[in-house]
Image (spheres, helix red, strand yellow):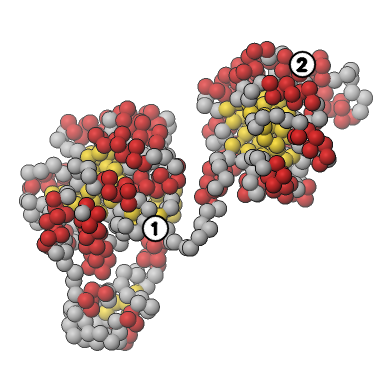
Amino acid sequence: MRGKKLIVAEIGINHQGDKDLAKRLIREAQASGCGAVKFQYRNLQSSYMGRGTQIGDEILQTEIHKTHLTAEELLLLAEYARKRNVQVGISFFSETDIDDFGSNVEIFDFFKSPSVELLNTDLMNRFQTLGKQLYVSLGAHREIEVERALGSLRGSNWTPLHCVSNYPTSLANAKLGYITFLLEKWSRPVGFSSHDVNWETCLLAMQLGASVIERHITLDKEMQGLDHSSSSTPDEFFKLSQFAAELEVALSGNGPRVPNQGEFLNLQNLGRSFYASKVLKKGTKVSVGDLTYRAPKVGLDKNTFTAFERLPLAEDLEQGEALMRSSYEGTPMLPRTLAAAAEEMKISIPVRLHDYEQLSSQIPVGAFEFHLSFGEVQRGLDLPAVRDSDRFSIHLPDYVDSSKLFDPFSPDAETRQLSTQVLANCAQFARKLQEATGAEVPLVGSFSRLHGPKKDFYERHGELSREFRQNGLSLAMQWLPPFAWYFGGSEKLDVFCSEQDSQFILANQVPLCMDVCHLGLGRNYYGFDAMEILANLQDLIQHVHISDTSGIDGEGLQIGDGDSGDLISEALRLDAYKVLEVWQGHLDNNRGFIEAVQRVVEMRG
């Protein structure tokens, strides 16, 4: 991993001398995910000697005078950017430029020496006295000049930027290999100042190791002005910022291949396994002629069937029923001693409405979580025959129809209406279960959609949980992974998954279902202290989901098969019901759930 990338939106002279346009460019840069903006400043009186006599000089001088903003105006813009949590920097071309800002120059987070001033020793020395990060652009100079300039710099707070001083720069002239050369020669972070025709060149620069990307921002590449054609629009900056944020993740995987959960899901849905083409009685030695090969892949496939081909069936197999390992070995049962230990530990098992009866007999741990689909909720939820000694929770569906995620605060009226109805129907079902068992039935949901400031998001969700509590119900928001598997693919989430989110949860006292697997994935992605988050949120944790993890997207692994064993052990100590959510635990007659129970009991010792 090479560290986080900083994307700098260079406003330069693209503000056209208009302060309002400059503010808009700041806002667009922030909305696009840029970590910083940068301006340029020249003292007009000390910049040029008279009127340019060359055509190029005349064009440049005319443009610079036309787009000039004073030091006072740039200081106000710097303050505007800082208030929006965007770093702000500036390029100076002379010591006089710096003097115009006086002590107020401290407002800037970083400075940049332009390529044309690389050999200006006095300016370079002055930059270093300011004590801020200095970016040094290397365009238009020979290597011997680069060596002399960089070799004279003191300290460690400077970063060379590869730059080709063409406006714009074609792919043929990009010379991105120089980034690798700089990294090896100077053994320090390196950046890239881009004037390229293609913004995608910045992606190649990051892949080669550039940790800072500077590129001009514009609202329209066709605007009149010198820099617009070599600039990027906010849409392009948004794409660049997205790639920068996930580049390290995209380049990871240098090791043995481990499929992610989305791949497992697609393998199940799209793959094939054997099904009985007719009724097959116990004791039958099944041949391929007795079977049909169809999707989904929930049983033995052509590879795994060969190990059982000569064995007799241990159970009858109905026509259309999947051929599984348990078809030969019999239905597994959780031993009573393990069931009693699991019940004491408040272990719970996920069930569907149709399999509660079978699963509760097969794995009698005394606690179960109904996982509901949007179709079941919309059709109406009839109470199954439940044992009043069992304890229950309800997992709200993630979807409200085939194309919409659950989101009761959505700006889309239809999504909001469907989600509100899901909440109401599930709340009614919870009341029925509470009446049948005489015990509280918590509702758990994934609230994953952010539509504005996080402060507002958590205030709304804290209030929603309090409304449920006032109506005699418990609603807990699930801790989420950094990437969620929605609609067959992966989506980056912005809430209930980071250290910052834990602070908002505390501030708004939001009841929580702590998903240990998701917490482990977040630790692997963000690098936060997951144990500290568990400790800080323990008073708000009303419910727990448990499975193991691998990396940042290996979700739902069997207990003990991943890298979150320490978190699982800690979560088992919590006084809350703990649902074992191992992926595909229900397949092969719930063999995965039985193994998960055995493993957590062993972990407790």
Q: Position of residue 202 (x, y in %)?
A: 65, 44
On screen, 566 above or below 450?
Answer: below
Q: Position of residue 153 (x, y in %)?
A: 73, 30
- Check disc 1: other Cα within 10 Å, few if <14, some if 14-19, many if 20+: many
On screen, 507 above or below 71?
Answer: below
Mark sitting on residue 488? none
In terms of depth relative to the viewer, which is nearer, 605 or 107? 605
Q: Earlier in the sequence, mark 2 or mark 1?
A: 2
Q: Quadrant of residue 314?
A: bottom left
On screen, 388 above or below 123?
Answer: below
On screen, 222 above or below 111?
Answer: below
Q: Quadrant of residue 291?
A: bottom left
Of marks 2 and 1, the one in the foreground? 2
Q: Quadrant of residue 500?
A: top left
The residue wearing badge 1 is 261
The residue wearing badge 2 is 96
Residue at image position (7%, 44%) is 438
In terms of depth relative to the viewer, which is nearer, 220 or 542? 542
Q: Position of residue 125 (x, y in %)?
A: 74, 24
